[in-house]
Image (cartoon, rainbow, N blue to C red):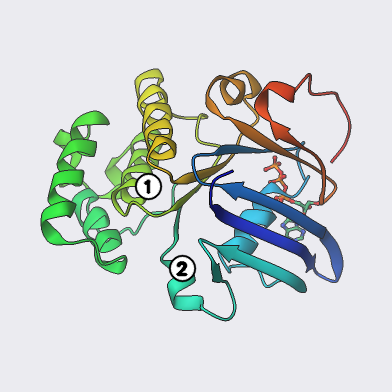
Amino acid sequence: MGKEIVKVESLFVDINHTPVLKGLNFKVNEGQICALLGHNGAGKTVTFRSMMGILKKKSGRILINGYDSEKEQEAYKQQFSYIPEEPMLFDELNVYQHFQVFALSYGVPEAEFKKRAHSYIEMFEMGEKVSEYPENLSKGMRQKVNIISSMIVDTPLLIVDEPFIGLDVEASYYLEQELKKRAERGMAVLLSSHVIEKVKGFCNTYIKLQKGEVVEYGDISNLRGFEVSKG
Ligand SMILES: Nc1ncnc2c1ncn2[C@@H]1O[C@H](COP(=O)(O)OP(=O)(O)OP(=O)(O)O)[C@@H](O)[C@H]1O
């Protein structure tokens, strides 16, 4: 068994005094591409937002690469990057400046940054768009800016919220290949998606949520059908 990159223990989160996450426990180890599954409203995004510190937890413990989300906040935040479902960009920054801002905030050395930026810009066919501002980009292109920004920083954990809706076939393919390469390098990926066939194709483990609780987890080969039920 590899090193634990994510460890979530008894995580409880309330929103507006309503329990949404009800004592989640799960782990993601190095080399794992783990699918976080569940129907609409099961709690996937709330889990991600709690891990990122955007939502305050009621109780429990979150460790990423051994760092505690509360006790070692600064180091904790350097251990992961996030690709959101809906692009989140700064209106006043062009494409390349987004990459620079991310790299700076994670302390990526200049030479390494340039190498990675060049490679990802080629891969995701963004060469003609590097000087454009978000308002002039399509939704898929905006998504690619978030993807590249998060890849460039090369953190032990990458959190990806529903990546396959809105990306073209080539971009989806390259994203999958990159996620696999990261796992081979001993990093971890936690990814939510409703596109089960895709998930089965390249994730190696899964966690299934239902109404804010883990109801199933394990090797992806154990993932059978996805029955119709609520939350
Ligand atoms: N800002 C909010 N205010 C009130 N309730 C919220 C808020 N955000 C999420 N919830 C509730 O938390 C629960 C979990 O929502 P969450 O967005 O995590 O689901 P999800 O699994 O990501 O669903 P989807 O597949 O639709 O994206 C839902 O019952 C939702 O209504």
Q: In this rendering, does residue 189 appear at all?
A: yes
Judge whether 28 appears above or below 139 on screen. below
Horizontal and vertical percent position of residue 122: 18, 31
Q: Which residue is mark 2?
A: 77
Residue type for callout 2: Lys
Give percent across and percent down for residue 86. 50, 45
Residue at the image point whose x is 10% and y is 55% from the top: 111
Q: Which mark is residue 146?
A: 1
Query: Which residue sits at x=58%, y=72%?
Result: 69
183 relative position to 206: left or right: left
User: Dot 1 lies on which element?
Assistant: helix
Residue type, mark 1 in image = Asn
- Residue 8 is situated, as x and y percent measured from the top left of the image, at 68, 60
Question: Is 21 in front, or is 140?
Answer: 21
**109 up-or-down from 114: above or below:** below
Judged from this view, the residue extending furthest toward the front is: 1
Q: Name the residue: 79% across, 23% down.
A: 226
Look at discs 2 and 1 and give the one toward the viewer. 2
Horizontal side of 150 relative to 1 (left or right) equals left
